[in-house]
Image (cartoon, helix red, strand yellow):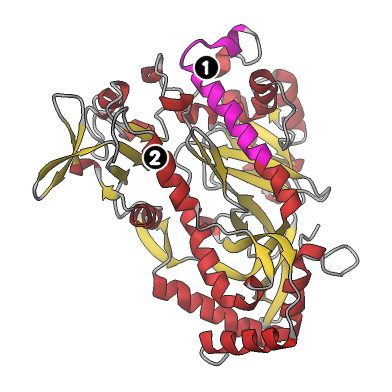
């Protein structure tokens, strides 16, 4: 299924204006606008880091100029489904660290929790502010040939990518400025204001003007661009572990040239195990000794809360529809991809018998690493995957190979010349959960650039697109159209 073009080759209603403009521009002008977009990305310093051969390589962010378009009415239901899912997941996480009713009632298996890589016993008995553990989440969605949007996975630990949602929009506005004046495209630039509002709400009681800090592992982290971007946009301090200290009063302070300054809320971009060497890995140099003590005492807010990753597990994922029904008494608005749990004998046998027709996923990897796509794997890869499943059934799941939806993309054609061809995509919206919920309109569309590929991760050759949630289209007068054309040519330096 192509999301912009119908089966009969005509534009879908929400994408009609975009495709009409692309058709009128022709490939050569589209390529020129793509080149200007790439120059914008270089000039703005929009990068991501790839770890290769032990070295960190900064690369310009891969961006395709042709956006993905989603009708507003469809997005309203998707947005509601994402907010619903996060409400249930946060109730689930809070339950696991406290009463564990979900286990007592037989909805969630105790042995699954017992072998969870991301359950933190150090968090038992804690009840964070608003009862929320996963404040910032990135939920990966895919659309199959049936046209239905499915949740592929939940990212609840330290999800990244939202800075590229905002930067993609800035570049797209320059590339297709004339369309933004003709269509009701929902804005995304309110995200940082919403994030700041959420973080402020986590401040200790009685604090009126809290000091916010973004805690980063440092410049060599693959998401460092995003850490610095968000800190700058929110007016927060960008700090590393060595910049912070926990005092005898169990409060967190930041070292400054004028002395120690209190920090009230930390948006941490460091994994749990490296957060506090007093509680987790004692050899960690990234975290802050005593940070967990300060958090437990209610003297500092932290997002996401330590331990939230217990629900960021591809095996736990299979139970989320049941968790929505259990905690909310509602049917899930967005379905899961059907998932086989190899921890159960019958499901494991099915997976091993049909391994060449399934996607095999490790429970706790991210970035697309460790995934085996059965019909594209070698015999040795399939054999190794089967052995890994047999050795550790709890650590694997399997899913059918979906025929992911496509979006037209500017790529080298078969003869090497530029061409517009369909490429597979997924979508990562970002959900903020606190006293209220906020869902980005659209999100980060990732695109598999090689022909036929299903791998969308930028670290493995994928690219990105701006995502337009469109509510309506305005027909410009001839005078407006002429003015927009002249204005756009001026912005692009005569292109």
Q: Is residue 227 left or right of residue 420?
A: left
Q: Is residue 270 visible?
A: no
Indicate the position of residue 299 as horizontal and vertical percent values: 27, 27
Q: Is residue 116 left or right of residue 30?
A: left
Q: Is residue 482 left or right of residue 60?
A: right
Q: Quadrant of residue 362?
A: top right
Q: Residue at x 30, y 43 (%)?
A: 212
Q: Quadrant of residue 109?
A: top right
Q: Residue at x 19, y 44 (%)?
A: 243
> Image quadrant for the C terminus?
bottom right
Residue 446: mark in rendering? none
Q: Is residue 54 left or right of residue 470?
A: left
> Image quadrant for the N terminus?
bottom right
Where are the magenta residues, as a range? 80-104
User: At numbered mark 1, what does the secondary structure look like: helix, strand or loop?
Assistant: helix
Q: Is residue 311 part of the magenta span, yes or no?
A: no
Extreme residue in the top direction? 104
Q: CA distance from mark 2 to mark 1?
A: 23 Å
Indicate the position of residue 448 as horizontal and vertical percent values: 64, 60
Q: Circle 2 is placed at which residue position?
A: 199
Q: Circle 1 is placed at which residue position?
A: 95
Pick whichever, 352 or 203, lies toward us: 203
Q: Residue at x 64, y 78 (%)?
A: 178
Magenta region, main secondary structure? helix
Pick whichever, 466 or 112, lies toward us: 466
């Amino acid at each position: 299924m192509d999301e912009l073009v119908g089966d009969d080759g005509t534009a879908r209603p929400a994408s009609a204006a975009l495709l009409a403009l692309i058709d009128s521009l022709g490939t050569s002008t589209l390529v020129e606008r793509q080149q200007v977009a790439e120059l914008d990305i270089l000039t703005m310093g929009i990068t991501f880091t790839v770890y290769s051969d032990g070295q960190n390589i900064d690369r310009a962010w891969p961006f395709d100029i042709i956006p993905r378009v989603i009708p507003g009415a469809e997005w309203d239901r998707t947005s509601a489904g994402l907010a619903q899912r996060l409400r249930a997941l946060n109730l689930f996480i809070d339950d696991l660290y406290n009463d564990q009713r979900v286990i007592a009632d037989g909805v969630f298996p105790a042995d699954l929790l017992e072998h969870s890589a991301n359950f933190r016993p150090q968090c038992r008995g804690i009840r964070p502010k608003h009862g929320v553990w996963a404040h910032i989440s990135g939920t990966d969605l895919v659309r199959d040939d049936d046209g239905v949007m499915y949740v592929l996975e939940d990212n609840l630990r330290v999800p990244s990518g939202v800075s590229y949602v905002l930067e993609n929009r800035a570049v797209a506005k320059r590339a297709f400025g004339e369309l933004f004046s003709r269509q009701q495209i929902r804005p995304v630039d309110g995200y940082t204001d919403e994030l700041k509002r959420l973080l402020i709400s986590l401040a200790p009681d009685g604090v009126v003007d809290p000091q916010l800090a973004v805690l980063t592992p440092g410049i060599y982290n693959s998401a460092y661009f995003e850490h610095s971007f968000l800190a700058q946009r929110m007016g927060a301090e960008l700090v590393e572990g060595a910049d912070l200290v926990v005092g005898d009063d169990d409060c967190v302070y930041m070292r400054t040239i004028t002395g120690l300054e209190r920090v009230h809320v930390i948006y941490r971009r460091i994994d749990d195990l490296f957060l506090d060497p007093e509680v987790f890995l004692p050899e960690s140099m990234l975290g802050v000794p005593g940070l967990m003590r300060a958090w437990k005492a209610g003297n500092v807010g932290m997002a996401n809360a330590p331990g939230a990753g217990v629900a960021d597990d591809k095996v736990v994922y299979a139970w989320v529809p049941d968790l929505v029904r259990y905690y909310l008494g509602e049917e899930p608005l967005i379905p899961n991809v059907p998932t086989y749990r190899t921890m159960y004998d019958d499901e494991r046998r099915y997976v091993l018998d049909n391994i060449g027709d399934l996607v095999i996923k490790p429970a706790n990897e991210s970035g697309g690493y460790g995934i085996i796509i059965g019909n594209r794997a070698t015999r040795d890869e399939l054999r190794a995957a089967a052995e890994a499943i047999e050795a550790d059934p709890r650590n694997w799941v399997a899913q059918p190979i979906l025929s992911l939806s496509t979006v037209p993309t500017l790529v080298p054609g078969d003869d090497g010349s530029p061409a517009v061809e369909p490429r597979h995509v997924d979508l990562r919206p970002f959900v903020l959960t606190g006293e209220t919920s906020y869902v980005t309109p659209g999100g980060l569309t990732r695109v598999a650039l090689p022909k036929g590929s299903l791998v969308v991760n930028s670290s493995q050759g994928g690219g990105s697109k701006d995502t337009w949630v469109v509510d309506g289209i305005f027909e410009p007068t001839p005078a407006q159209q002429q003015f927009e054309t002249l204005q756009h040519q001026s912005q692009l330096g005569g292109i």
